[in-house]
Amino acid sequence: MPASIGHLSSLEILNVSTNYLSGTVPLQLSYMRNLQTLILDHNKFTGQVPGWLSSLPVLAVLSLKNNMLNGSLPYSLASLQTLRVLCLSSNFLSGEVPDLRNLTNLQVLDLEDDRLFSTCANKVKTPTKLARMTRLL
């Protein structure tokens, strides 16, 4: 993905699924302050889910499924107040799921086929509005 993508400051939707993109999720995306939907599914992104995603103030849909992301989920995800859909399935993520109860707009949480867990009596702390959640280990 070209570094100049960050200059698209008015862009609201970015979907680059199934493009064989690799490397880490580009930091330049953090400059896209109007981004509401970010879909990077079915690529070969590596590294961790970036903590800077929480700097996208109007992000409503975040989907990074079917990549090669690893490590734990950043606790900063819990500050994405506008997030409605969070799909991170089929990566190599591990560790504890952060407390997501403050994501009061969250409707879809997809963490299937990762190695994530919750220490709270095997229940993920999620908002009451959550409409659909796929299973955790």
Image: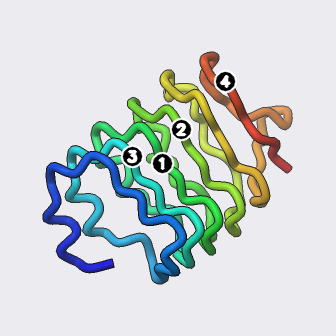
Which residue was labeled with disc 3?
Answer: 37
Instruction: Specify the amino acid type for callout 4.
Output: Ala
Report the number of numbered marks: 4
Determine which of the numbered discs, if any, sits on residue 62 in the image. 1
Mark closest to the chain's N terminus, 1 or 3:
3
Q: Residue at x 51, y 48 (%)?
A: 75
Marks 1/3: CA–CA distance = 6 Å
Q: Earlier in the sequence, mark 4 or mark 3?
A: 3
Q: Nearer the viewer, residue 88 or 119?
A: 88
Q: Amino acid at mark 2?
A: Val
Q: CA distance from mark 4 to mark 3?
A: 19 Å
| Mark 2, secondary structure of its residue | strand
Contact check, label 1 and label 2, Cβ < 8 Å? yes
Numbered disc 1: secondary structure: strand
At 60% across and 36% down in the image, what residue appears? 99
Quadrant the N terminus occupies: bottom left
- Mark 1 → mark 2, Cα distance in angstroms: 6 Å
Instruction: First in sequence, mark 4 or 1: give its number.
Output: 1
Q: Is residue 28 left or right of residue 133?
A: left
CA neighbours of label 2 inside 10 A, class few (<14), some (14 to 19), many (20+): many
Task: Name the residue beneath numbered marker 2.
Answer: 85
Q: How many neighbours does mark 1 have within 10 angstroms: few (below 14), some (14-19), or many (20 or more)?
A: some
What is the secondary structure assignment of the residue under circle 4? Answer: loop
Q: Locate residue 81: give its quadrant.
A: top left
Q: Residues within 10 Å of mark 3 (few under 14, many from 20)?
A: many
Horizontal and vertical percent position of residue 43: 55, 73
Amino acid type shown at disc 1: Leu
x%, y% of residue 127? 60, 22
In the picture of the structure, the residue carrying the numbered disc 4 is 131
Residue at (39, 46) in percent of width and height: 37
Residue 92 image-quadrant placement: bottom right
Which amino acid lies under the numbered mark 3 shown in the image of this protein? Thr
